[in-house]
Image: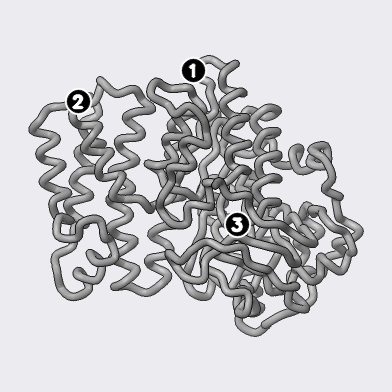
Amino acid sequence: MQKFLFFIFYFVVMGMLGQDFKQNAILLETDKSLDQLIVGAGDKKLVLLGEASHGTHEYYYWRDRISRRLIEEHGFNFIAVEGDFASLYELNKYVKNKSGAAASAKEVLKNLNRWPAWMWSNEETVALVEWLRTYNDALPEGEKIVFYGMDVYDEWRSKSEVLRLLENHDESVRKYVQTQYDCFSNYKGFSWDYARAVSSGRHNCAEATKNVVDYIRENRRQFDYLSDDEYFYLLQNGLVVHNAEAFYRKSVTSPAAESWNSRVYHMHTTVNDLLGLYGNDAKGIVWAHNTHIGDASYTGMRSTGEKNIGQLSRETLGAQNVFLVGLTTYQGKVMAGREWGSPMQEMTIPKAVKGSVEAEMNETGLTAFYVLFGEKDRAEKNLKVVGHRAVGVVYNPRNDRRQLVPTIVPLRYDALFFFAETTALKVLE
């Protein structure tokens, strides 16, 4: 199989899928349409739900419906999303009705200010979070479902949170941590300035951030005034600072795969830590882009050395304990920006490129459906490389043909959702 994969990725540019999508399609109409997916995913340790963009209503809506059923019917414990840890922790406080929590999901989400805020500051996320709050209200404290960001960004807020949580601790410890974080004092919240300074020969802060993480880990008894949940929050914020330092530094000083993988390992480790936090029988749901969810081993990412959460989860937990779900579209609307930090706008996603998986799925004439991939679909004769669209938060529709990721679809995913035409997220005003 390894030689076969090498051959097709290096010598095949685009081929027709050996799949009969129309015959295998499961029409997507109501929540009941998800029955077969829920049966296939319900006993897994992790269910990873993707998206072909960060700004599409249908992706968020159906991931919400899948998540609710997995929680209600199969006892899943948490949702981890491709979002900032510290800021989205406020949602976690809200869904668990913690002391000091916001009055509503909208109150939390409207206060998000780091670009691209629309990824979570939208009506679709509000609907899920309010449902979680209602669902949790009927559960004892130890059984409440949690909602966490798992990404490496918003590191300056995480620095502040570590120091805030140490305010009631031994003053010498807080001073020690502050001294370590003073390594960043010349950069005043600008991580890219720090990374460029390091590339120019300035001292890096990797050891300083590691010192903080090590101290928190090695002195758990000193933090007995924190609950397990609060201690996890303290440690995770320390890890965000530590791993963000590596991500930004490597983004400037190292090959692209190293910086990408440093972020991937952080997200993967966060998900595994959540599984550990909630016990041996814990089960989790992950929301992230298809490029993070669909196993990178079966994409063009393999040739550049880039990994992702889907691949690492299969490797560490076993493929039999993981269920990977992709979502994609033929055409539609999306919220995105022309460049990093530019104003959000509604853009048009053009019709998919001929020969892509999206074009082939559109040929079924069906408006919304999904397919489940089994052993028959993974027979070698069906393993063709096709282009698979990936739209980021930065997007230019005129360059859409460049957004294709070479993919062996039935190996990359366990299921793939398709929408002939999609609409943009409903962003909070």
Q: Residue furthest bottom?
A: 11
Residue 345 x %, y %: 57, 63
Q: Tell me which label, 2 or 3, sits earlier in the chain.
A: 3
- Determine the residue positioned at 60% across, 32% down: 76
Task: Residue 321: tell me if it is visible.
Answer: no
Residue type at mark 3 is Gly
Choose top left, top right, bottom left or bottom right for residue 51: bottom right
Mark 3: secondary structure: loop
Q: Nearer the viewer, mark 2 or mark 1?
A: 1
Residue at 68% in and 74% down: 387
Q: Earlier in the sequence, mark 1 or mark 3?
A: 3
Of the numbered discs 2 and 1, the one sitting upstream in the chain is 1
Residue type beneath disc 1: Glu
Q: Secondary structure at mark 2?
A: helix
Residue under pointer 3: 55
Residue 5 rendering spot, x and y as whole percentages? 63, 72
Mark 3 surroundings within 10 Å by alpha-carbon count, few (fewer than 14), some (14 through 19), many (20 or more): many
Residue at point 67% right, 34% down? 68
Q: Which mark is residue 141?
A: 1
Residue 304 visible, this orientation:
yes
- Give residue 222's mark: 2
Q: Is residue 97 above or below residue 373?
A: above
> Residue 321 has which mark?
none
x and y percentages locating residue 398 in the rendered image: 62, 79
Image position of 294 (left or right of 249):
right
- Disc 2 to disc 1, C-alpha distance: 24 Å
Instruction: Work out which quarter of the rendered image holds the N terminus and state it.
Output: bottom right
Residue 190: x percent and y percent?
A: 26, 60
Q: Quadrant of residue 129?
A: top right
Label 1 Cα neighbours within 10 Å, binned few <14 / some 14-19 / many ≥20: few
Q: Secondary structure at mark 1?
A: helix
**Label 1, label 3: how many angstroms apart (C-alpha)?**
33 Å
